[in-house]
Amino acid sequence: NAGVMQNPRHLVRRRGQEARLRCSPMKGHSHVYWYRQLPEEGLKFMVYLQKENIIDESGMPKERFSAEFPKEGPSILRIQQVVRGDSAAYFCASSPRVSGSYEQYFGPGTRLTVT
Amino acid sequence: AQTVTQSQPEMSVQEAETVTLSCTYDTSESDYYLFWYKQPPSRQMILVIRQEAYKQQNATENRFSVNFQKAAKSFSLKISDSQLGDAAMYFCAYRSAEGGSEKLVFGKGTKLTVNP
């Protein structure tokens, strides 16, 4: 069973460009979480999605950031008009269900650098 | 809102020795889960151990064990017989079990160095 996959692993964007980060959850997992890790910091929750639904976006900046998890295909985290402060590692995690103590399984992350 | 505090930014241990990493948390909930994640230089987040708040027995996974003190809201990680491969950032995390979002709340991490 393949783990959580994220691509690209590294992404360089100039200020003002768009960044698209992709996450394919583990097989059989229908819940996806996105986290951001700034340098020397822990991970901070951004958004929680199920297929075709955003369940909790309380950690997502109100502007320029959006996320989706379509019926088919990977989850996408989209950052429009990137700024230097968006430079960070973005991690995706998936889990098979909501209730219970099921862990969240993390992908290897995408390191975004804004120049 | 829940918070997680790791008061030790860095720790070091000699190979084969034992080390304890501290974690405290703040919550008004009675039902929740606690986790320790390891992040080696590859940056991959690896689950080390988990604890359900309703269980009094401390969780153990091979050389890793926790000391869970619910009243004190403390959740420390003990690593026995430390190995060079244990060197990494260690993050303590909290997750509510009372419905709603299942997001993880992380501490800022402890960098563990293992000396040969």
Image (tube, grey):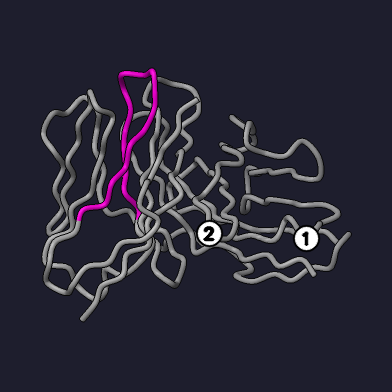
Q: Depth check: give the residue in front, B99 or B50.
A: B50
Same chain assignment for discs 2 and 1: yes
Q: Which mark is residue A40?
A: 2
In this rendering, is residue B79 above or below B84?
A: above
* Residue at the disc numbered 1: A84
Most frequent secondary structure within the magenta stretch: strand
Range drawn in magenta = B20-37
Query: Chain letter of disc 2?
Result: A
Query: Chain letter of disc 1?
Result: A
Crowdedness near tag 2: few (<14), some (14–19) or many (≥20) residues, C-alpha within 10 Å: few
**Cα distance in 3D space between marks 2 and 1:** 16 Å
x and y, in percent, of residue B19 in the image: 19, 59
Identified at 12% across, 57% down, the residue is B62
Check disc 1 and give the amino acid type.
Arg
Q: Which mark is residue A73?
A: none
* Mark 2 or mark 1: whose residue is earlier in sequence: 2
Magenta stretch contains residue B23: yes
Residue A13 left/right relative to A32: right
Check disc 2 and give the amino acid type.
Glu
x and y, in percent, of residue B22 in the image: 28, 46
Identified at 63% across, 31% down, the residue is A58
